[in-house]
């Protein structure tokens, strides 16, 4: 029976035709030449379908790097060079890529390193991902076991009473069998069971790659929360320092009001600024506690405070980031590797579904002792054996096998689109992180100059107010501008550090060869 969607290889068809035109074909039985095409089809069905990686456009360089060098980004497709060639490219460019660095070198913070080590042991999501590997491995073991025959120790005994030829006479019969039996074992002549085993093996690899992705995401998530906590600490310190200054300003304004130099409006403005600082301080304390709770949950702890002593400005980001080649991303990103393994598993499932149309050959055997008398079961000459081969060919099943092929092919098409989307999303994340790092670095330098200018402005405004040259509104505006710019500087500094972390995660940092089991 022809396989749906399967075509004979052109070379095989040519060989069959040449064989039929040979001079000695007259020596063959009359029907054998007519059966050769069917035989060739069966032989072709035994060969597993070759995996063809979906064609996805891969840029030669990242957009920001090409723009920085004044070049144009080529959107052409990188020519497929096979897995070995891609691994060679990844190895060549990996030394300079941020994703090739160990995660401890991304942020030089010993406290953060200790937290990550704790999370890698106790985080629930990572432990679940590791257990999914074990689940997939067990399912692979079940599929692989079908390739081998099973041997059971069996014993059966029967004692029955049946009427004889004369209805008045009854016969009592006994029958006993003891030995080793092999249940119906399917001989995988066409490779159907091997294809199912390969699909299960690829699912193990996909689960391992996903666990690597969870590990990388965990490092990035923990680093981001830690940076956010340091940012809130910096904002809290700025607000507290501003609050102390506004308390002093309020006392000075009240003293000047008592002396008749300032108006009651200046006092109310100073009180409003002080209350605004207290409001911001309470809000920051709330956000700090919630971030600590989130960080503790990621660590596998109950919600609570997180001990820390580092400062945000003590973690200088790198001057420049190198993302390597876009073509190397496919071998490094865990989600891309998982999508490819799932796609290979789907291809094997399609292969197995198509081969279900072919005949199935099963074998059942028994080796042991048999007797019609329990007492003579193990006597000499009671040895027994049986060999029962059978072959079955599906003729009509209501379309069940064809529906199975269609289901497997639909799942394969879905995974192809998911694979393409995963690669495009990976390119986007890397490009976004590169843009964020570059622009936030520029923004941080500009914000630093704004802070310096606002500090000088506040100093001059205070001097002018004390000298009676300007009103207190000028001081209020200068204080507000300085406060906002200092908070903005802390946030932009955190943004630069988080861009480094996000780029590391987008490059699959630390995931390639992270130690997940590869079956």
Image (spheres, rainbow, N blue to C red):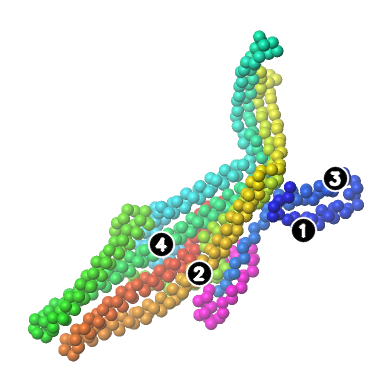
Q: Residues within 10 Å of mark 3 (few under 14, many from 20)?
A: few
The dot on residue 78 is none
- Residue 421 occupies which quadrant of the picture? bottom right
- Rendering coords of residue 402 (x, y %): 66, 49
Mark 3–mark 4 Cα distance, whole angstroms, equals: 70 Å
Do the residues under discs 3 and 4 have CB atoms within 8 angstroms?
no
Q: Nearer the viewer, mark 3 or mark 2?
A: 3
Mark number for residue 10?
1
Element under label 3? loop
In terms of sequence position, does the residue under pointer 2 or pointer 4 come before the other? Answer: 4
**Mark 1, secondary structure of its residue:** helix
Question: Which residue lies at the image location 64% right of the left edge and 31% below the top edge?
Answer: 181
Distance Cα–Cα, label 3 vs label 2? 61 Å
Q: Nearer the viewer, mark 2 or mark 4?
A: 2
Q: Is residue 72 magenta?
A: yes
Local packing at callout 4 (Cα closer than 10 Å; few below 14, some 14-19, many 20+) is some
Residue span colored magenta:
62-91
Residue contact between numbered discs 4 and 1, judged by CB atoms under 8 Å: no
Q: Position of residue 401 (x, y in %)?
A: 65, 47
Kind of element beneath mark 2: helix
As measured in the structure, the alpha-carbon distance from the residue carrying label 2 to the one carrying label 4 is 19 Å
Residue 25: image location, x then y, percent:
89, 49
Residue 428: numbered disc: 2
Q: CA distance from mark 3 to mark 1?
A: 23 Å
Disc 3 target residue = 31
Residue 260, percent across and down?
9, 85
In the image: residue 495, left or right of residue 185: left
Residue at image x 29%, y 71%? 235
> Residue pushed farthest top?
168
In this view of the protein, can residue 515 be seen by the observer?
no
Residue topped by disc 4:
221
- Alpha-carbon distance for marks 1 and 2? 41 Å
């Amino acid at each position: 029976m022809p396989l749906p969607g399967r075509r004979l290889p052109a070379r095989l068809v040519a060989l069959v035709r040449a064989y039929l035109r040979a001079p000695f074909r007259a020596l063959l039985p009359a029907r054998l030449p007519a059966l050769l095409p069917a035989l060739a089809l069966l032989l072709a069905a035994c060969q597993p379908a070759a995996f063809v990686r979906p064609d996805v456009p891969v840029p030669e360089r990242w957009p920001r790097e090409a723009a920085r060098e004044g070049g144009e980004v080529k959107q052409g497709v990188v020519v497929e060079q096979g897995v070995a060639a891609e691994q060679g490219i990844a190895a060549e460019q990996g030394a300079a890529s941020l994703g090739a660095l160990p995660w401890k070198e991304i942020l030089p913070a010993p406290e953060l390193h200790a937290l990550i080590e704790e999370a890698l042991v106790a985080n629930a999501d990572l432990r679940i991902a590791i257990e999914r590997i074990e689940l997939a491995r067990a399912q692979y073991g079940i599929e692989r076991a079908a390739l081998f025959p099973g041997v059971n120790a069996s014993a059966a005994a029967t004692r029955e009473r049946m009427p004889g030829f004369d209805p008045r006479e009854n016969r009592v019969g006994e029958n006993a069998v003891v030995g080793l039996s092999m249940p119906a074992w399917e001989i995988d002549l066409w490779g159907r069971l091997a294809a199912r085993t390969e699909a299960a093996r690829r699912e193990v690899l996909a689960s391992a790659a996903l666990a690597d992705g969870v590990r990388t995401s965990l490092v990035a998530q923990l680093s981001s929360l830690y940076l956010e906590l340091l940012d809130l600490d910096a904002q809290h310190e700025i607000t507290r320092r501003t609050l102390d200054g506004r308390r002093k300003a309020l006392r000075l304004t009240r003293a000047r009001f008592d002396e008749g130099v300032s108006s009651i409006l200046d006092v109310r403005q100073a009180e409003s600024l002080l209350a605004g600082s207290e409001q911001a301080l309470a809000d920051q304390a709330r956000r700090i506690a919630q971030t600590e709770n989130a960080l503790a949950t990621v660590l596998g702890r109950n919600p609570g405070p997180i001990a820390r002593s580092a400062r945000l400005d003590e973690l200088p980001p790198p001057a420049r980031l190198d993302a390597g080649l876009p073509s190397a991303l496919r071998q490094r990103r865990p989600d891309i590797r998982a999508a490819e393994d799932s796609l290979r598993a789907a291809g094997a499932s399609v292969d197995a579904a198509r081969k279900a149309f072919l005949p199935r050959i099963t074998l059942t055997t028994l080796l042991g002792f048999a007797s019609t008398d329990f007492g003579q079961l193990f006597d000499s000459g009671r040895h027994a054996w049986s060999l029962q081969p059978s072959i079955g060919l599906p003729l009509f099943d209501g379309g069940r096998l064809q529906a199975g092929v269609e289901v497997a092919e639909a799942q394969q098409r879905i995974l192809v689109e998911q694979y393409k989307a995963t690669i495009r999303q990976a390119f986007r994340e890397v490009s976004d992180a590169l843009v964020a790092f570059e622009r936030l670095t520029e923004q941080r330098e500009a914000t630093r100059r704004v802070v310096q200018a606002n500090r000088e402005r506040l100093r001059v405004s205070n001097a002018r107010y004390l000298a009676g040259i300007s009103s207190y509104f000028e001081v209020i505006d200068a204080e507000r501008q300085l406060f906002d710019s200092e908070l903005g500087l802390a946030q932009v500094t955190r943004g630069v550090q988080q861009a480094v972390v996000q780029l590391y995660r987008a490059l699959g940092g630390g995931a390639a060869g992270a130690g997940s089991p590869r079956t």
